[in-house]
């Protein structure tokens, strides 16, 4: 077994102080990073070249989102619904309510290589522990919504697609395993891709590089792990925060890895030790990413 390479720790890009930073994507058209602070129901945009930072308040928690082929629009996975959002004036078009009547909310999401938005939900119990009540869904370009034939989950995460679009990765964070399956109009039987075993952490968000490796942020373990396409660990990237949440390749050449993080759930003593919890981090990791797929459907 090859010993994975341990990279230099990530640098601080922005001390954002997010409660639950998530959903980060790079927009080539705007040369900007977008991400969300789920708990504060706020969308952020950072232009790294100038340092200009903007934000938009949301009507409810924003879990994840997708860039759109239509200029100036995002597709939002808000806690209870999917909606188009026009950045220029904040106009919101709700298109689908998600799992009404269930104690769940939207969570991780990403566009596939065909321009369809794939997302999952998570259980939010009034009391007690999370249970596998969430599902995975796909919004097609014609705005039709379909439930994917995947097992129910407690916390959907790690949704990503191979460079050729024929493999989907995903996880239930509480199971501490990342799964993969053959992907297309239909999905094949899921197979185990990576297992965190007895480690006291969870797989969170993921992205894919141009070589087809998967980079996974690991909540509670202060690291991002790069897995080769066969599931072997290639590189370990330390993050100066205990709870990294999602990576994304960005920059003009897509050669900088950015990672969001969270303060959520940390005690006062833990926050004293974790001084950059909730920050945005960056690192040059020696590989390039892929352009972020855009949702192919159009706002009404």
Image (cartoon, grey):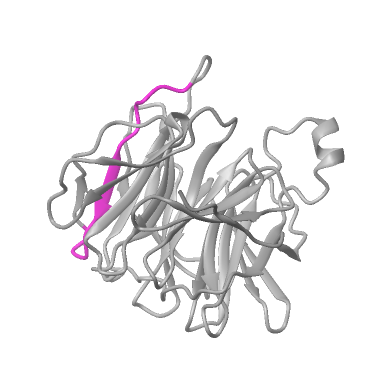
Q: Position of residue 52 (x, y in %)?
A: 71, 77
Report whether residue 22 is seen.
Answer: no
Q: Residue furthest top?
A: 128
Can residue 4 be seen here? The reply is yes
Q: Quadrant of residue 257?
A: bottom right
Residue 130, horizontal then vertical, whole percent: 46, 23
Q: Is residue 16 magenta?
A: no
Q: Main secondary structure of the magenta part?
A: loop
Residue 32: name its quadrant.
Answer: bottom right
Of 143 and 129, the residue lying toward us: 129
Total number of numbered labels? 0
Q: Residue at x 46, y 30 (%)?
A: 174
- The residue depicted at 41 percent of the width and 71 percent of the height is 292
Depth check: give the residue in front, 168 or 58. 168
Q: Position of residue 216 (x, y in %)?
A: 50, 52
Q: Is residue 182 left or right of residue 34?
A: left
Q: Position of residue 212 (x, y in %)?
A: 37, 65
């Amino acid at each position: 077994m090859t010993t994975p390479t341990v990279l230099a720790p990530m640098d601080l890009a922005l001390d954002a102080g997010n409660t639950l930073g998530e959903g980060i994507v790079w927009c080539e058209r705007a040369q900007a990073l977008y991400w969300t602070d789920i708990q504060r129901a706020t969308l952020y945009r950072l232009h790294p070249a100038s340092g200009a930072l903007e934000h938009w308040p949301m009507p409810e928690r924003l879990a994840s989102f997708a860039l759109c082929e239509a200029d100036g629009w995002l597709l939002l996975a808000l806690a209870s619904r999917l909606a188009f959002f026009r950045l220029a004036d904040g106009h919101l078009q709700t298109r689908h309510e998600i799992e009404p009547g269930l104690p769940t909310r939207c969570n991780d999401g990403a566009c596939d290589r065909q321009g369809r938005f794939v997302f999952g939900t998570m259980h939010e119990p009034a009391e007690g522990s999370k249970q596998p009540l969430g599902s995975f869904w796909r919004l097609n370009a014609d705005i039709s919504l379909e439930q994917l034939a995947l097992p129910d989950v407690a916390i959907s995460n790690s949704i990503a697609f191979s460079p050729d679009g024929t493999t989907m990765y995903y996880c239930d964070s509480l199971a501490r395993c990342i799964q993969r399956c053959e992907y297309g109009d239909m999905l094949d039987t899921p197979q185990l891709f990576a297992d965190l075993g007895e480690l006291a952490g969870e797989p969170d968000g993921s992205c894919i590089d141009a070589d087809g490796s998967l980079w996974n942020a690991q909540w509670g373990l202060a690291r991002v792990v790069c897995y080769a396409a066969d599931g072997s660990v290639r590189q370990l990237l330390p993050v100066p925060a205990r709870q990294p949440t999602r990576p994304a390749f960005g920059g003009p050449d897509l050669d900088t890895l950015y990672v969001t993080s969270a303060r959520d759930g940390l005690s006062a003593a833990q926050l004293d030790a974790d001084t950059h919890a909730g920050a945005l981090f960056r690192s040059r990791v020696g590989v390039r990413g892929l352009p972020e797929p855009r949702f192919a459907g159009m706002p009404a």
